[in-house]
Structure formats: C-alpha cells, structure tokens
Amino acid sequence: MSTAQATVVPSFIAGEWISPQAEGGTQVLDANTGQPVATVSAGALDVAAALDYGRTVGQRELSGLSLHQRALKLKELALYLNERREELYEISYRTGATKIDSMVDIDGGIGVLFTFSSKGRRELPNSNVILDGPTEPLSKDGSFIGTHIFTPMAGVTVQINAFNFPVWGMLEKFAPAFIAGVPTIVKPASPTGYLSEAVVRMMLDSGLLPDGSLQLLSGSARDLLDHMDYRDMVAFTGSAATANKLKAHRNVVDGGVKFTSETDSLNAAILGPDAVEGTEEFNAFVKAVVSEMTSKAGQKCTAIRRSIVPEQLVDAVIKAVGERIEARTVIGDPRVEGVTMGALASLDQLRDVRQAVQDMLDAGGELAYGSLDAPRVRTSGERTEIAQDGAFMAPVVLRWSDPANPILHSREAFGPVSSVVGYRSLDEAVELAAQGAGSLVATVCTNDPEAMRALTLGIAAHHGRVHILNRETARTSTGHGSPVPHLVHGGPGRAGGGEELGGIRSVM
Ligand code: NAP
C-alpha cells in the first residue's frame, strides 16, 4: 500500500494471503485528493474456509495458551505496533484523518491492547477457565455442589466494522476475544479497509499470533452470516439500518448466532442552568462541542449531535461555538502544515452528510453557522482555495425553533454537523435527550450538584455512558467522545443495545 498505485486489498484466509481480481471491484480514492488508493474486489471470498480454519486451527492454537499467556502476547503485539505507527499514519492520511485523528485511531487501538493485557494478567486467573461467583451448596452435607464457569466459545468472533475507526474499531474487539481464547475474523468497511489490512499484515508479520487466531476478509462478504452457526458471534459496528438487516438473518433468528451491535446515535450534551457565559463550565462545553464536531471531521459515532442548553443561552452557545471553529479550524489535506480538519472519508459520505443536513433544513432546521458549499481548503502556507477533488465539508451548526422536531432527534448527519436547542426546565432537558431513543454517550455540564444529579439520573437509562463535565473534571477528562477500554462502550435502543469494552466484562 505504499505506492499511489491502486492495488486490490488482499484477504488473509486459512493461513494465506489472497489477492483476487481487480475487475468489477470498487475503486477507493484518497479522501483529500481523489487519487486512487486501492480496489476492493467484488469477487466472492471463501468465508466457509475462514470460519472452518478459525473453528479448528484457531481454536486449537489459542487453547494451548493460558489466559495470562494470551494477555502477555497482547502487550508484545502492542509494543511491536507502537514501533511502526509512523508507517500507519502515512496510510491513514489518505482516509482524511489528521495526525491527531490517527492517534485516536491507531495509538488508541494500541492502547486498548496494553490495557487489556495488564487487566487480563491482573484480574484473571492464570488458567483457561474463569470461575463466576462462589460455589453453591446443593446438598446438606456438601457432597453435591454447583458452580458457574466461563469457558471459551466454540466458534469464532466475526467483526463487521464501520469505516471511521479502521484500527481502533478492530483492536477494541480483537483484544477481549483474543484473551478469551476466541479466534477473530475481521471484515473491515470497504472505504478504509486498506488501513485495517496494513495493521493486520503487521500483526501477522510480528510472528506473535497463534495460527488461525486472526483472519481478514477484504471485500463485501455479503454471504458472511450464511455460513455461521450457534458457535459463532457477530460483533457489528455501523449504521442501525445495516444492523437491523443482519439481525434479521435466519442464522441469527433461528440458528443461534450471537449478535451484538454498536450503531448510530444522536448523542447529546446538556448545559446546566448555572453554566452561563463566562463560567468555566460554559467554556468547557463549547470546547467539547467544537472538538466533537471537528475531530475525525465529525465522523464519530459518539460525536455530540445535539446541544441541549437553557433557552436563554442558545444564541450565546451558537456564537461561541462559531467563534471557536473560526479561530481553531483549518480545513485541508492533513499532510499540509497547519491543517486541523481533513476530508470526510469519501465523496459518497460527503453527499450523504450534505443530504442529511438539507433534509433537516427542509424539515424546519435553520443554518446558524457554516454552509453546505465547498469550503476553502489550505493548500500551503496561508494560501487557500475552494476545495476541488476531496470530500471536504465545512462545520455546520443548526438552530431549531421547535426543540421537539422529530428529525433533529432521529437523523444522523455523520460529519461536522451539530444542532443547538433550548430547554425551559431540567425535566424538558431530560425529555429531549431521551428523544434520541437510546444513545452511546451524553455529557452533563454543570457545577451545580443538584442539577448534575437530576440530569444524570434522568438520562442514565437512555445512554451507555454519562460524561460529567465541570471545572474539576475538565482538567483531566479524556473527552465526551472517547470510549476508554476500562468502561463500557455501547448504548441502548438505537445505539444498538450492545456492550463492548468495560474491561474484563467484555472478555466474559
Ligand atoms: P454501514 O454502511 O452500516 O456499514 C458497516 C459495515 O457493515 C461495513 O463493513 C459494511 O461493509 C458492512 N455491511 C453492510 N451490509 C452488509 C451485509 N449485508 N453483510 C455483511 N456486511 C455488511 O456503516 P458505515 O457507513 O461503515 O459506518 C457509519 C455508521 O456507523 C454511522 O451511522 C455511525 O454512527 C456508525 N458507527 C457506530 C459506532 C458505534 O460504536 N456505535 C462506531 C462507528 C460508527 P462494506 O463497507 O463493504 O459495505
């Protein structure tokens, strides 16, 4: 992948790299320049062979290692990848990611390996099974007792991943599965699968992984679930529409394939009534909103899509958000000095996001900041020009006269887009947040303990994670949109109902 020549992204199946024909495949372009990067083959992949290899060779090789030995391998793997990050950043630029975006994806993914390695060795026994709770006496004299134990699943975990985090999204699922002794098959999203392929190749080249513990399917693999059964699991990340389709597959409904999903989410950030202009909370809130809009060009499942603020602060928040974007955001090819926000992942993505914004405007939203026109992008030094070839989009803030407008709470514009709405009471703020029908994360930003309690308890059941932001936590918070390996990532309802990470919980 080191040349600009468009090569077919290979797959790794049953111990061999396979490069199918390019004919009929989909060309993937550099998100910033429109130059060809790779071709994703349309040819059939031997999914059955991959599953069989994982269930036999992968299972056998992994079971030869204890929980601690597998956890230690994750650390060795993390150290190996750490040495090779620069190579991955170069590839990652092509997806539209800046260096900082890539650090979230690549270093963040490596960080998950480190965390799971140390938690695995610290919190799990050095054996191949895990006891779950105390022994239950089932007879008076103790001659008959019962206990729960966790053993590895008999099949494989198939990851179907979204395009936005081609490295982190893969490693955060791989780490717990590997410790649990379950082989992984990765099916990356086609637009950025070439970066996942580069990482998988490094992981395999390291020589650290047992045979069959990691395989890669580069391509559409639409028949994946046809070959799976009750021994296997699908860990899906992507849109709710795709998740719903896959969840209805007969092998899930009748065949017992385990299915977890992390899907889209209209995440909220609520500003407390005390956090008026000039307070540290107001500033921290504005900073969080802008960071979530511009990091990865807003292509984060956890990004803040809805700012729910006291009615009288709507104008002030919009103004401050606009000023901060103006002062800190430089759009362009991330390889150009000074650029802080790259392109969206593809021209298709740009079209989808613009359409989503247009639909929201048509349904009653108002453009409060930004525009849907092609933005000016930095070309060199201070020079800028109107974007020509890349999938560039300027940040956009929407204002709403009706805070309950359904489209505001249901349409995900997966780009640098966020809405600001007003509330009149804390109860209304809770109701508005809940209209997302289940989200991954929400921020509650207030320094008033009573408001914090009411908002947090009010919204908790609708969210996977609540991020508390005030002058204290702002100093060290890793941010609204950053899932951490120690805590659960997932959310109810529309967010997919899944649960990932959360330390050893995910190994179980
Ligand atoms: P997507 O279109 O739903 O695709 C997700 C994955 O599913 C891709 O790998 C895609 O492969 C694959 N796929 C689609 N149809 C399939 C089928 N019939 N059988 C097997 N695989 C199939 O989503 P996306 O556009 O990549 O990602 C953006 C969405 O993901 C956003 O809505 C975002 O909110 C969500 N997301 C959620 C999380 C989370 O943790 N909750 C994280 C990141 C993103 P191809 O690419 O080859 O079509």
Image (tube, rainbow, N blue to C red):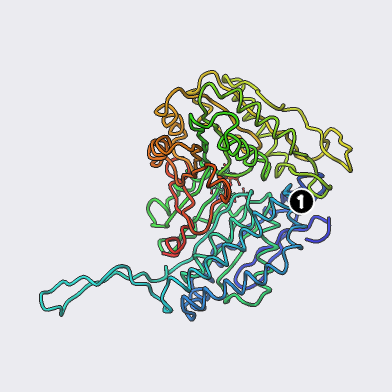
Q: Quadrant of residue 167?
A: bottom right
Q: Is residue 427 left or right of residue 163?
A: left
- Percent of width and height locating residue 346: 71, 43
* Amino acid at circle 1: Arg
- Percent of width and height locating residue 216: 62, 63
Please tell me which residue lies in front, 128 or 135.
Answer: 135
120 up-or-down from 353: above or below: below
Q: Is residue 312 visible?
A: yes
Please tell me which residue lies in front, 160 or 455.
Answer: 455
Q: Is residue 151 left or right of residue 193?
A: left
- Residue at image position (42%, 57%) is 257
353 up-or-down from 26: above or below: above
> Few, some or many C-alpha atoms within 10 Å of disc 1 (few <14, some 14-19, many ≥20)?
many
- Residue at image position (47%, 41%) is 439
State the residue position of label 1: 94
- Percent of width and height locating residue 260: 45, 53
Which secondary structure lies at badge 1?
loop
- Percent of width and height locating residue 138: 16, 71
State which quarter of the image contains the N terminus. bottom right
Please tell me which residue lies in front, 329 or 148.
Answer: 329
Q: Is residue 326 left or right of residue 257?
A: right
Q: Quadrant of residue 208?
A: bottom right
